[in-house]
Amino acid sequence: MKYKYIGVDPLTPAIGALISGVDISTEITREIVEEIESAFHNHLVLFFEDQKLTPSQLVDFAKRFGKIGYYPFVQGMEAQPEVVEVVKNEDEKINFGGLWHTDTSYLPKPPASSMLYALEVPTFGGDTLFANMYLAYESLSEEFKQLISNLSAVNSAEKPDAAVTRVHRIAEKPRDSEDIITTAIHPIVRTHPKTGRKALYCSAAHSMHLKGMSIEESGCILEYLYTVQQREEFSCRYKWKKGSLAFWDNRCAQHNALNDYHGFRRVMHRVTHEGDVPR
Ligand code: OGA
Ligand code: MN
């Protein structure tokens, strides 16, 4: 793949690329947007470094790639409601997103993609892992692919390991919780609407069990798939710097925020894009 306007340097053969040559705080041209989109579909998560973005510039950049979505549990910033602050304070032990997941897959229409912009990062630690769910799927035998081809998972926001990662942020800025949807049934193999490729879509964070199967029965399949999804050979690890922005595809990638920096503060601004019903 040749790019004319941007630099694209892969992090690993499996996933992730560093994008250079663009100042995303300015209004970028249609040609640059298209190149970013094609790099996005090739590498699944893109990183832009040394960027200076106000919350409104972050939203302007995000809008070039889709309609802005919203996070059901935590309120956005007062001045910029599309942006949610993802914080871990010095005295906290729990971090937001600290397990393998794809964002809010318990919603009927989970976000297509997410952007995270780093304002304050720990001196060391606090990296994020990303993994390629096309490769995870493609690594399965034809027989296993066949076996799982029509299975769906019941995804819930209430799995304890995932629910706990939100508690501090919800305590700080709760959204009106009356009508939050916290369960959705989605196929565990989905076809990406843009690339047409199949990807594994169940996740250790949100999938409770397979539709029509007990937790024990489901475990045989789901627990195995989680180990495949989390294989090093499908992943990359990103070390954040202040001013870095990550832009990832929730339909074909998962991520995991490492929680190895107790005592340090980490502050990110987060925006998501609306997505389709997974099929
Ligand atoms: C998220 C998330 C990861 C991180 O914002 O959806 O999982 O590294 N964050 O903070
Ligand atoms: Mn996440």
Image (tube, grey):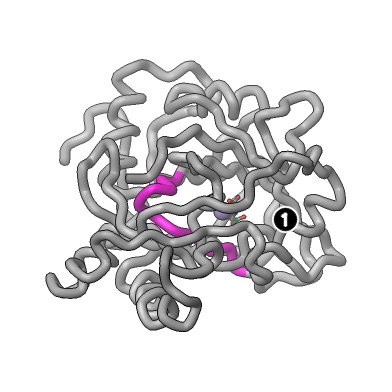
Question: Is residue 193 shown left or right of residue 79?
Answer: left
Q: Which residues are magenta?
A: 248-258
State the count of labels. 1
**Residue at position x 66%, y 29% in the image:** 82
Image x and y of residue 5, in percent: 29, 27
Badge 1 element = strand
Image x and y of residue 80, in percent: 72, 26
**Residue at position x 44%, y 36% in the image:** 275
Identify the residue position indicated by label 1 in the image.
Answer: 266
Question: Is residue 198 shown left or right of residue 79?
Answer: left
Residue reaching furthest left? 142
Question: Is residue 61 shown left or right of residue 217?
Answer: right
Q: Looking at the picture, which amino acid does disc 1 mark?
A: Arg
**Residue at position x 55%, y 28% in the image:** 68
- Judging depth in this view, the residue of 29 and 278 nearest the camera is 278
Image x and y of residue 150, in percent: 27, 59
Residue reaching furthest front? 212
